Image (cartoon, rainbow, N blue to C red):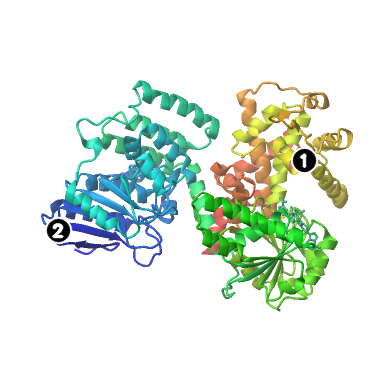
Amino acid sequence: MAFETFRFDVDADGIAVAVFDVPGRSMNTLTAEALRDIAAIAARIRTDNAIRGAILTSGKPSGFCAGADLGEMGDSAGGDASLSEEERLRRAFENGYGFNRVLRELETCGKPVVAAINGLALGGGLEVCLATHYRIVTDNPRIQLGLPESKIGLLPGGGGTQRLPRLIGAQKALELIQTGNPVSPQEALKLGIVNAIAAPGTELLKAKDWIRTKGDPVQPWDKRDYKVPGGAPQSPGGSGVFTMGNALLRKTTYNNFPAQKFIMSCVYEGLQVPIDAGLRIESRYFARLLMHPVAKNMIRSMFLSMQELGKGARRPRGEPPTDVKKVAVIGAGMMGAGIAYVQALAGIETILLDTTIEAAQKGKVYTQGLLGQQVERGRLAQDKADATLALIKPTTDYADVKGADLVVEAVYENREIKASVTKLAEAQLGPRAVFGSNTSTLPITGLAEASVRPENFIGIHFFSPVDRMGLVELILGKATGDHALAVAIDYVKKIRKTPIVVNDARGFYTSRCFGTYLAEGQEMLAEGIAPAIIDNVGRMTGMPRGPLELADDVALDLAYKVREQTRKDMGDRYEAGPSDALIEAMVVKYGRFGRKNGKGFYDYPADGKKRLWPGLTDLVAVRTREADPAAVEVLKKRFLYRQAVEAARCFGEGVITDPRDGDVGAILGWGFAPWTGGPISLIDTAGLATFVTECDRMAQAYGPRFAPPQILRDMAAKGETFYGNAARKAA
Ligand code: NAD
């Protein structure tokens, strides 16, 4: 019998080798066909008397298996809206439990099965391996093994929450499943997730050897004397894991992520019953999660949309593919140095130009440092690091820019300097080369006035620190053409980041919306809400940090300057808020500029942790000292809705035109509460009419900054949603 997604052979010793190799795909995923094949393979191993044992391995150089097909899963998340909730839940359970049943058949097939893991095994891919009796992984530090489902709001639904804790104990298993972080082969061996490590190319030999010499076909948890490592949940050792674990979970997630909570329940409940019952418990939680809006929104934004944007969903149609081979980075400061590093990693020849050779060289030293760390950790070979570093050429000479396909300008935030750099660089560029500016605040259309070819001028806005931030915001000036956008998108893809595309406007998209989070924190403070409550509630909404501490990092004097400029530019249209006076007093009267001068909303003693500045209580009449739970909910809503209204305004003004840009840009760019799926998903999930009514109420209570823009009223009147409209447009 032939399989669609596996090659299957039995050798002369009666050992079957099933090679996972989904046709037409560069990476194996657990498609419906693959699951059918695994079921048929399990049946074949059980019933074919000529087979004494089996090995699962992969035929793909890219890895063993990347897990479930999230495209298929995203479609089924939330279920068919025409069915009753009960029916949707029943179907989701049947789907999830189907996978569990197949893997259970594999591990109880009566013959020894080995996983020869010759590449990454993530999610369902690792769960398949956990359902075998012996796991051998190739000795390659780049291979990742893990259960990352919780990162997109799901739980491992193929027995991961049952087998991993039975194998390595609840504490370690919970840590891995709840963070979703992968481990290397060596770490996996130490933890007991795999049984052995093999030199590349020797996995099959080792697997066959184990089948011939040991070949135990019974999982530890199916043996009579089995005990959970570290103790079952009711044992003294085991119970501590769950009491502490629950407290820690609450502290780190503020209960915003149902997946992490459900994972805890799966492990706690599942370990108290035999594995078959445990797997049913897991499938029940999995189904409930799949129906949950948090999972649906997270899968869409953090996986599907991110992947689509990364693959060039916003690339202009009809533009031929481009490949930037040489890029000149001008300005080797904090941003330029980071940009040079990510380019070199991607194999791009990089010119790093500054006003002095010392400054340019300093930028290159930054890359040397980061590469050195990787070599030290055993993640990169010295010769590869040397070759990467050699790609960066520090210089002060514009003649080196000649032949560049792209320039990324990252000099001081000053119009005149940027204009002069534009002219000098363009004089060296070929007609198709593109000029990108990494400005964070200056409108692109204005900067492009210095260019003789504004159609090839674009904003390429990186985030700091460049090596860790996955987003690049591409900004179209009035004259920016399709070729420039295509080159910029291809470049961002090459340096393995995610591009969003926005139109030119004050603060573009990300800085503008992020600013409203900081501003709302300041409004709250001006109203007399205790600063500690403000920052704590900020984190409770799922934002990475509180608005006051973030404002200190960005710098209060900068915020003050930007507000003054905005007030001047906008004239009568400027809406003054109560926090304007507060910031003015902080900066002008008290000289508190933020972290940079050690004095902001917080004090930063040289020898200790930062503390809230006691003088704040003299500056504002703090009314609330205790966090009453109802008041906390109100503040959370203010933080989220304020940012979402601003994102909707950006949509209304045409700054963003695709909901995916809005959501992915928010989560990757300024850490907008990921559990919501982003501000646009938040509005869709609340329902347009409900969101508008609520914003009208909040505008009455707190001010016109909450007033919903016309686009929301129009959409609410027509019963539309952002993603519904986008789907109709795409169809
Ligand atoms: P920086 O001060 O660290 O670096 C600027 C570099 O430009 C310096 O090395 C300086 O010597 C060099 N330079 C100045 N004039 C030059 C000229 N005429 N020719 C060549 N080099 C020149 O600044 P940064 O933080 O790296 O910011 C650079 C740009 O990136 C700014 O436009 C800024 O708005 C933008 N940006 C910054 C951040 C951030 O978080 N720092 C984030 C996104 C964008």
Residue that label 1 marks:
596
Residue matched to label 2:
13
User: Left of 668 or right of it: where is 710?
Assistant: right
116 shown above or below 330: above
Q: Is residue 517 left or right of residue 26?
A: right
In depth, the one of 372 and 7 nearer the eye is: 372
Picture disc at residue 398: none
Q: Position of residue 584 (x, y in %)?
A: 85, 37
**Ligand 1 under 8 Å from disc 2 Cβ:** no
Return the x and y of residue 420 as percentages of the image width and height.
83, 67
Q: Nearer the viewer, residue 198 or 684?
A: 198
Residue flagged by tag 2: what amino acid is it?
Asp
**Quarter location, residue 483:** bottom right
Q: Is residue 372 above or below residue 328?
A: above
**Residue 574 in sight in this render:** no
Q: Vertical placement of 389 versus 608: above or below?
A: below
> Splitting the image into four quadrants, where does ligand 1 fall?
bottom right
Of 49 and 104, nearer the camera is 49
The N terminus, quarter of image: bottom left
Quarter residue 195 falls in: top left
**What's the residue type where badge 1 is placed?**
Lys
Q: Position of residue 255 (x, y in %)?
A: 52, 33
Instruction: Name which residue lies at 71% across and 60% down.
Output: 361
Q: Secondary structure at mark 1?
A: helix
Instruction: Name the residue located 43 percent from the left edge and 51 percent from the top edge.
Output: 144
| Residue 199, placed above or below residue 448 | above
Specify the farthest residue to the bottom: 431
Mark closer to the chain start, 2 or 1:
2
